[in-house]
């Protein structure tokens, strides 16, 4: 599937998004990292390999690190276990979370304090008073960093919204007496060289909409789903009542535009992407494969040697548009 993605994106305008505040934030974050005891990197659980900055390891060095895979509700249990095994083999502590509901936040708090416990042991040995553990939360845009902090604090301390670029400055917040958290804006590389990864970011809404053509990305998503006849193609036909002609995503979007949006291709493309992001293709999906079309499609493009198949089953019989 990655080979197909590279082929499909060759003629498209490259997906690039680097708003002005990111360069400033990157410089400030590097300075703040000197004060941080443990780094919490948040990624999108659907595409964890595509939502990490290529310079992250260089920035963090030997600092203690926790990997949070957010939106765990959007992947299957089998995929969750496989990703946990994949990262544990690399020696990385993994916490799965749902920032909207607060799942995984208490485990994250305990783990951060545990990993940084040695800080105050050293301070006491020097005759210094203990201080709160300082944890920096970093990651790509719209992966749920601020929502995670708000859930930890049980109040809205950091601006959060389901779109990239809401957090625009670094902010320290106190969590009880023992933990201080640094919220940071999402940081992307100045240039995304891997355009297959960039398309995944666009599909999953982890990059600003201005960086890509919605119709192009939706067409590629349709083509990805069409490559999976028993899963994706059936889901498209069930939801939109439109036959998928081979693997031509552009033609499918145009048909949907004529059927529902008076020929407005942008609106049709946005609907397909929105439905995918909200998991609506899974509603009423009875394709015989024990996996939602969303999970299966993303699984096919996000490579992990440990993941072979998934076991999530979504039932129901409402297969119409809502």
Image: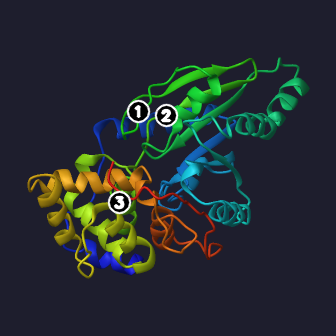
Foreground of the two, 147 or 175: 147
Tell whether label 2 touches label 3 (CB within 8 Å): no
Estimate the spatial distance between the alpha carbons at disc 2 and disc 1, rounded to whole Å: 14 Å
Which of pointers 1 and 3 indicates the residue nearer the eye? 1
Neighbour tally class for label 2: few under 14, some 14-19, many 20 plus, Cα within 10 Å: many
Where's the N terminus, which quadrant?
bottom left
Let me know if residue 63 appears in the view.
no
Identify residue for label 2: 184
In primary-sequence order, the first of circles 1 and 3 is 1
Identify residue for label 3: 192
Most extreme residue toward the left, as rendered? 263
Identify residue for label 1: 161
In primary-sequence order, the first of circles 3 and 2 is 2
**Element type where label 1 sits in the image:** loop
| Residue ID at (9%, 53%) | 262
Residue 255 position within the rendered picture, expressed as x and y whole percent measured from the top left: 16, 66
| Residue ID at (49%, 34%) | 184
Neighbour tally class for label 1: few under 14, some 14-19, many 20 plus, Cα within 10 Å: few
Which of pointers 2 and 1 indicates the residue nearer the eye? 1
Q: Which mark is residue 240?
A: none
Residue 30 position within the rendered picture, expressed as x and y whole percent measured from the top left: 51, 39
In the displayed structure, 158 sits above or below 241; it is above
């Amino acid at each position: 599937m990655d080979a197909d993605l590279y082929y499909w994106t060759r003629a498209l305008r490259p997906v690039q998004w680097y708003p002005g505040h990111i360069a400033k934030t990157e410089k400030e974050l590097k300075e703040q990292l000197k004060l941080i005891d443990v780094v919490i990197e948040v990624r999108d659980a659907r595409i964890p390999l595509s939502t990490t900055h290529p310079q992250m390891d260089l920035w963090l060095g030997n600092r203690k690190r926790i990997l949070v895979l957010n939106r765990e509700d959007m992947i299957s249990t089998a995929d969750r276990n496989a990703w946990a095994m994949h990262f544990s083999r690399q020696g990385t502590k993994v916490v799965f979370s749902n920032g909207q509901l607060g799942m995984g936040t208490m485990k994250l708090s305990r783990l951060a304090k545990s990993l940084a416990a040695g800080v105050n042991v050293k301070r006491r040995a020097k005759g210094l008073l203990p201080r709160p553990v300082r944890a920096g939360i970093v990651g790509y845009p719209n992966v749920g960093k601020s929502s995670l902090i708000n859930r930890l604090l049980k109040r809205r301390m950091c601006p959060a919204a389901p779109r990239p670029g809401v957090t625009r400055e670094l902010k320290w917040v106190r969590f009880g007496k023992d933990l201080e958290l640094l919220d940071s804006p999402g940081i992307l590389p100045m240039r995304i060289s891997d355009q297959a990864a960039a398309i995944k970011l666009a599909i999953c809404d982890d990059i600003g909409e201005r960086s890509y053509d919605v119709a192009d990305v939706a067409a590629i998503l349709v083509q990805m789903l069409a490559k999976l006849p028993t899963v994706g193609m059936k889901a498209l036909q069930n939801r939109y009542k439109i036959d998928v002609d081979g693997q031509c995503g552009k033609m499918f979007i145009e048909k949907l535009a004529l059927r529902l949006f008076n020929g407005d291709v942008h609106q049709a493309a946005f609907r397909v992407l929105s439905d995918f992001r909200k998991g609506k293709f899974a509603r009423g999906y009875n394709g015989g494969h024990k996996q939602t079309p969303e999970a299966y499609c993303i699984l096919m493009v996000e490579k992990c040697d440990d993941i072979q198949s998934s076991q999530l089953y979504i039932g129901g019989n409402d297969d119409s548009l809502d």
